[in-house]
Amino acid sequence: MMRCVMSVKRITFKSFGVDLVGNLYFPEGYDENKKYNAIVGASPFPQVKEQVLATYGIEMAKRGFVFLAFDYLGMGDSPALAGEHKQSRYMFRLIENTWDAVSYLGTLPFVEEIYGLGVCQGGSIISTAAVTDHRIKKIATVSGMMADDAFQWVGKDVTDA
């Protein structure tokens, strides 16, 4: 019989006036009266919280961290802004979504320090977010794509293809 090593809670937080949707992973034996270091995950393009970040959420919870995987604006369960197509990936919005995720983690009484983990394009997002937001104490990237390329600036005809 396998034993569950952690739990997951679906959460929402505000960014650009809409509710972004995330999954918060808790370590085994989580105690709301204790303090934990938390990690905000920055996903690869065009992934959602149930893909790569779910794998890291489970692994980081096994290591005693609280881990936040969330869908960026217009991705997965998070809505797009009114009048915009679902898969917009404007870099400045991704960074602001990340800052808002950090703000959400900062409201949780059991969170001590906040770290960042970026995978592929998420490496660029978390790096920029951490340089401009000192609440993020440490970061790690996995195959970090540090490009500032056309995916941020072209229209849906190019990105959707």
Image: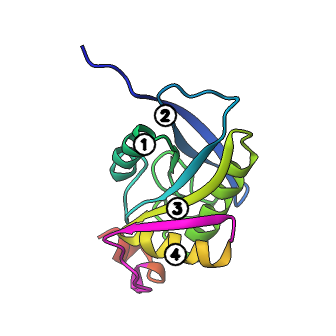
Crowd tier of the residue under label 4, counting other residues whose Cα lies within 10 Å: few below 14, some 14–19, many 20 or above: many
User: What x and y, as percent, mark residue 95?
Assistant: 59, 70
**Could you tell me if the residues under marks 1 and 3 are in contact, i.e. CB atoms within 8 Å?**
no
Disc 1 from disc 3: Cα separation: 15 Å
Cα distance between the residues tagged 2 and 3: 17 Å
Query: Which of pointers 1 and 3 lies earlier in the amino acid sequence?
Result: 1
Residue with the most extreme top position: 1
Cβ–Cβ under 8 Å for marks 1 and 2: yes
Closer to us: mark 4 or mark 2? 2
Residue 116: assigned label: 3
Q: In this figure, which residue is indicated by the disc labeled 1?
A: 63
> Which label's residue is closer to the chain start, 2 or 3?
2
Across and down, in percent, residue 9 comes to 54, 32
Q: From what the image shows, is residue 137 above or below residue 56?
A: below
Q: Earlier in the sequence, mark 1 or mark 4?
A: 1
- Contact between marks 4 and 2 (CB within 8 A): the answer is no
Alpha carbon separation for disc pair 1 and 4? 22 Å
Q: Residue at x 51, y 44 (%)?
A: 65
Magenta-tinted stretch: 134-151
Label 2 sits on residue: 27
Give the numbered dot on residue 127: 4
Q: Earlier in the sequence, mark 1 or mark 2?
A: 2
